[in-house]
Image (spheres, rainbow, N blue to C red):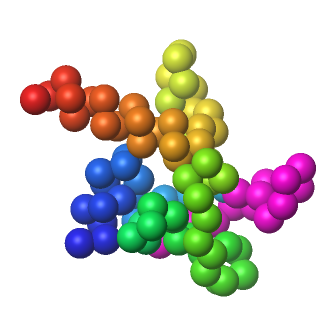
Amino acid sequence: MPERTLNAVGLRLGEPIRFRRNEGGRWIEGKVARMEADGSITLHDPDGAARSLRPERVQVRRPASRGRLAWKTVSEVAVTWEQLDLFES
């Protein structure tokens, strides 16, 4: 069930992501664990600690316009993923 929820917004279990502990801080890489009922994303930081963050604060790597991987916010990826579902219908 958790994987289905993650797939619905374009994420995969264990996928590398990055986040900042506070605004203007350095980026910290982690891994996707699950999506919570309130829409936040639970991830594990390099120390193994679990954190739940809003999609706007988490970035994931996706192909950019020329195919090169670039960091994009999860909220951007989710909107793109939902639009793809509309075209398939």
Q: Quadrant of the N terminus?
A: bottom left
Q: Nearer the viewer, residue 83 or 10?
A: 83
Whether residue 81 appears in this view of the structure is: yes
Q: Position of residue 64 (x, y in %)?
A: 54, 24
Which residue is at a point 50% across and 30% down the rendered structure image?
A: 63
The percent position of residue 57, horizontal first and vertical second, equals: 66, 53
Looking at the image, the residue that sits furthest to the top is 66
Q: Residue at x 80, y 64 (%)?
A: 21
The one nearer the camera, 26 or 46, is 26
Closer to the camera in the image, 35 or 12: 35
In the displayed structure, 62 sits above or below 66; it is below
Residue visible at 62% across and 53% down in the picture: 58
Image coordinates of residue 42 in percent, x first then y, are 53, 71
What residue span does the magenta drawing correspond to?
A: 19-33
Q: In the orientation shown, which residue stands out farthest toward the left? A: 89
Q: Is residue 20 magenta?
A: yes
Quarter holding the C terminus is: top left
Magenta span has 5? no
Please name the residue shown 63% across and 75% down the image.
51
Where does the image place residue 34, in percent across and percent down from the top left? 43, 70
Drawn side of residue 40 relative to residue 2, left or right:
right
| Left or right: where 14 falls relative to 60 | left
On the question of residue 62 being in view, the answer is no
Q: Looking at the magenta stretch, what is its main secondary structure?
A: strand
